[in-house]
Amino acid sequence: MADRPIQKTMAASDWALLTILSVVWGGSFLFVGVAVRELPPLTIVALRVGMAALALRVVLRIMGVSFPRERSIWLAFLGMGILNNAIPFTLIVWGQSHIASGLASILNATTPLFTVIVAHYLTVDERLTGRRLAGVIVGFLGVAVMIGGAAMHALNADIPAQLAVLGAALSYAFASIFGRRFKTMGIPPMATAAGQVTASSAILLPLALLIDQPWTLAMPSTGAILSLAGLALVSTAFAYILYFRLLARAGATNVGLVTFLIPVSAILFGVLLLGETLEPRHLAGMALIGAGLVLIDGRLVSAVNGLFSAKRPAPHGNG
């Protein structure tokens, strides 16, 4: 069967996948928040990708899906692991050790902006349009409003740390473009997800052993272990299956929109599970994010334009 072309407008099923992905990745903030109390960040990241790799390899074996062995494919897995895990995870962990998580979330929400620009120059089917750029900017403003003015006031804080998080967002943008090749290689999303986290594990596990020396740490609590399991199995293994499926269907620009929805999911998790308060700025930010996504999708805008065009009287000819 021929490859399905990249969609400029996402179908309802694609929006559903994007929403589920944002919930799964938004939940990672809860898991990390518990685990980081007892384990160093690099160890958490290494265990996250290592456990996800093991889980996905087991699932592939149970399903009877053959795992690619070609050198060219493994080089691609390595490139994706570096761009989508090793570089951004490390930069974000280091950046968040110097700046507040709210500011880091705003900076991370520049991922769609970087993605539309990178996709414009590196692809032929995801060109930048004025409406799409406007939607990205409105969505970014929504994230900034939702997270609040205190984070914005921190923009004069540690500049290298802010640049690190921006570098992570740029790396995610390049990863989305790079990851499109797995569709043309004929590799299913589950195998791609397994290959990426396996390659990431080969990079991050030795670093964690060298730097954190986890054998010297105290045994983590049951809560921390369960949080690590949730982070690895739900927010990484399952999430990357959805990510690569959506990337193959809807393209890099559309999949990058998940960074607008992740803060929404994280805040709603906090309200529902941690008893936090939903403030007016949260609702205003969510409304702006929704408006940005409507602009990016384009169908409602086109329908409204068509409605007004239909009501406009046709010009009369002379004579």
Image (cartoon, rainbow, N blue to C red):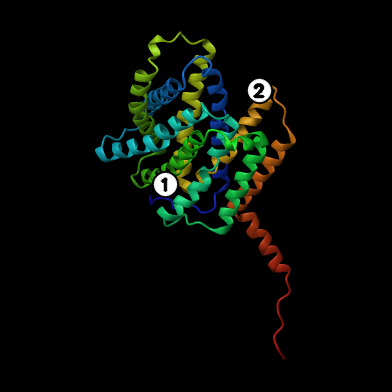
Decide which of tag 1 and tag 2 comes sooner along the chain: 1
- Count the numbered circles shown: 2
- Residue depicted at 62% across the width and 34% down the height: 151
Lateral position of residue 241 relative to residue 182, left or right: right
Q: Tell me which amino acid carries mark 1.
A: Ile
| Residue 171, picture quadrant | top left
- Residue depicted at 56% across the width and 21% down the height: 33
Circle 2 packing at 10 Å, graded few (<14), some (14-19), many (20+), is few
Lateral position of residue 11 relative to residue 303, left or right: left
Disc 2: which residue: 273
Residue 237 in sight here? yes
- Residue depicted at 69% across the width and 85% down the height: 317
As drawn, 231 above or below 131: above
Q: Position of residue 260 (x, y in %)?
A: 58, 40
- Direction left: furthest residue: 71
> Who is closer to the viewer here, 282 or 291?
282
Circle 1 packing at 10 Å, graded few (<14), some (14-19), many (20+), is many
Lateral position of residue 114 relative to residue 102, left or right: left
Label 1 SS: helix
Q: Position of residue 283 (x, y in %)?
A: 71, 38
Disc 1: which residue: 177
As drawn, 129 above or below 233: below
- Direction bottom: furthest residue: 319
As drawn, 285 above or below 96: below
Q: Tell me which amino acid carries mark 2.
A: Leu
Q: Position of residue 12 (x, y in %)?
A: 58, 46
Residue 102's label in the rendered image is none
Instruction: Give how far apart the Cα atoms at labels 1 and 2 are.
Output: 35 Å
As drawn, 76 above or below 230: below
Label 2 SS: helix
> Who is closer to the viewer here, 127 or 143?
143
